[in-house]
Amino acid sequence: MLTIDDIRAIPLFSTLPDDELEHLAHTCADLHLCAGEFAVHEGGERALYAVVSGKMEVIKTFDGIERTLGWRLPGTIFGEVPLALSSPFPGAYRAAEPSRVMRVDAQRYYVLAAASPEIAVKMGALARERIGGLQGLSAEPPKARVTMIGSRWDTACNALRQFLSRNQISYDWMTPDAPEVAARWPGTCPPEQDCPVLRLVHGTVLSRPATRELAELLGLQTQPRLAEYDTMIIGGGPAGLAAAVYGASEGLRTVVLEREAPGGQAGTSSRIENYLGFPNGVSGDELASRALQQARRLGAEILVTRSVARIDVAGRSVHLDGGDVVRARTIILATGVTWRRLAIDGFDRFIGKGIYYGASRSEANATHGLDVYLIGGGNSAGQAALYFANHARMVTLVLRGDSLEKSMSRYLVEQLRGKSNVGVQLRSEVVGARGDTHLTAIDVRDGLSAEVRQHDCGALFVFIGADAETAWLPEEIARDVRGYVLTGDDVVKAGRWSHSRDPYLLESSVPGVFACGDVRLSPVKRVASAVGEGSMAIAFAHKYLQHDAG
């Protein structure tokens, strides 16, 4: 417990009368931290902290890389900036050695400052000094972790750009004929046949690398650290990341396998307006980034560029691509769904060269001044249309139906109507794609007149629904005709349950194997429901481990 002498040794409080010191000693938290423990994380709620003993490291994450900004020694304080701005902590404070820290909650500080104006003056001066330091940091030009040279219409270049973007890796991309190449690429520009060529921030140069090779060089985890886990989560979308957060926080040895990048389809969403707790909306990649940081901080392993070759349900082992075999006491399927493809002549040769399935946010800057088309009338198409409207000259939604309101949330319809450069073509469908090296035009047929018209098109984004790709799952895991995994009562109704107890709500036909999110047979397909199911899956996994697992 804090004593009057402990608090008086802190210069900020040294002039306070004994009764106020006594009150602080009885109302403030006394944090005893081991080396590596955090007093507060980046984004934490505002409060005033004072170092009683030990040494605290001030850290902040820039572009996924942790950076040390300074230190706090006994007698010093931190938290003045959040209190001055009524904002979350801009950085984190971690014990560099066993430390003791006093925490004054925000309300208690404001009462103290009102009663002792000299404290408010000292805090204000310190806050101005620290804000100046943060402004200096923000003024530093950001240094991209990867510099890339490659053609815009090269599918390998496009795939690498999407990989970097979705994994929140900053990169600087130039085409081989760009005038700035000579100034921004050290040495001789690589020949076009070697492109895409990437230079990492530490100097390594790669020509047409595989994503796993690039991931490893960038410090992303691709290999499991253990031979066995309490729970293995296959898929890193909202459901999988929620399961990872809850699994790791409850002490389970948790690993997530993700073949592309954490976030799933939600990670490509330009704006999710109705997610609880974000009154101004949140982009899919921001939501994914926050969940990813949270899962890793709690101890979950997140493996990227890894997919599952097969699951041996009898031996409870998962065979990964590349030959690795990992045992898992429970398995959570959170693989989501994949965009449905259009069977139109000419489409396949333009994929990544002007035609994209889903919203490729990395292509937004390349649509400046162009006419962009989107196929589909659901919420995903509406969100993408709003996003691209900030870049393209004109965005047009093409859909077979006769009304947006039948398939899109009202708030999105109203926002689209407020955009002067967003149009809608109802009762229409795209029937052809034109171009030489890349897409330049599309053919659109009017559903009423059957007339086909050609339109210049700088990029086409397709949102026509999605399917569960679960053919790789073993036969023991029951699915419906469209590939969605059966769980709970649906397993019983299908006659695929033989265990002595009833299946848990999210349990598949194989005890200990669960499904959550879009891959599970369910009429509800929402980010919020996927997150809820991910957390529920961990609760059921706990029950299985307690009562069924050997």
Image (spheres, rainbow, N blue to C red):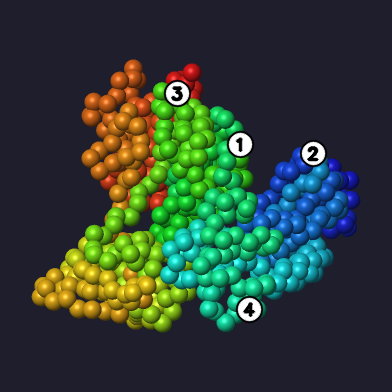
SS label for mark 3: loop
C-alpha gap between disc 4 and disc 2: 63 Å
In the picture, measured across the screen, residue 137 lies left or right of residue 397, that is: right
Point out the image quarter for the N terminus. top right
**Could you tell me the amino acid type at mark 2?**
Met
Label disc, if present, on residue 225 of the rendered structure: 1
Dot in front, 3 or 4: 4
Marks 3/2: CA–CA distance: 52 Å
Residue occupying image coordinates x 45% and y 56%:
267
State which mark lies toward you, 1 or 2.
1
Judge whether residue 202 can be spotted in this image. Answer: yes
What element does badge 4 sit on?
helix
Q: CA distance from mark 3 to mark 4?
A: 57 Å
Image quadrant of residue 30?
top right
Say which amino acid is labelled 3. Answer: Gly
In terms of sequence position, does the residue under pointer 4 or pointer 2 come before the other? 2
In this orientation, which residue lies closer to the viewer: 332 or 143?
A: 143
Q: Nearer the viewer, mark 1 or mark 4?
A: 4
In percent of width and height, residue 224 lies at 57, 38
Q: Secondary structure at mark 1?
A: loop
Q: Could you say where residue 370 lies in the image, as x and y percent from the top left?
A: 38, 80
Residue at left offset 78%, top offset 64%: 123
Asked if the residues shown at circle 1 and circle 2 are in contact, with their CB atoms under 8 angstroms apart, the answer is no
Judge left or right: residue 183 versus residue 522: right
Location of mark 4 (residue):
182
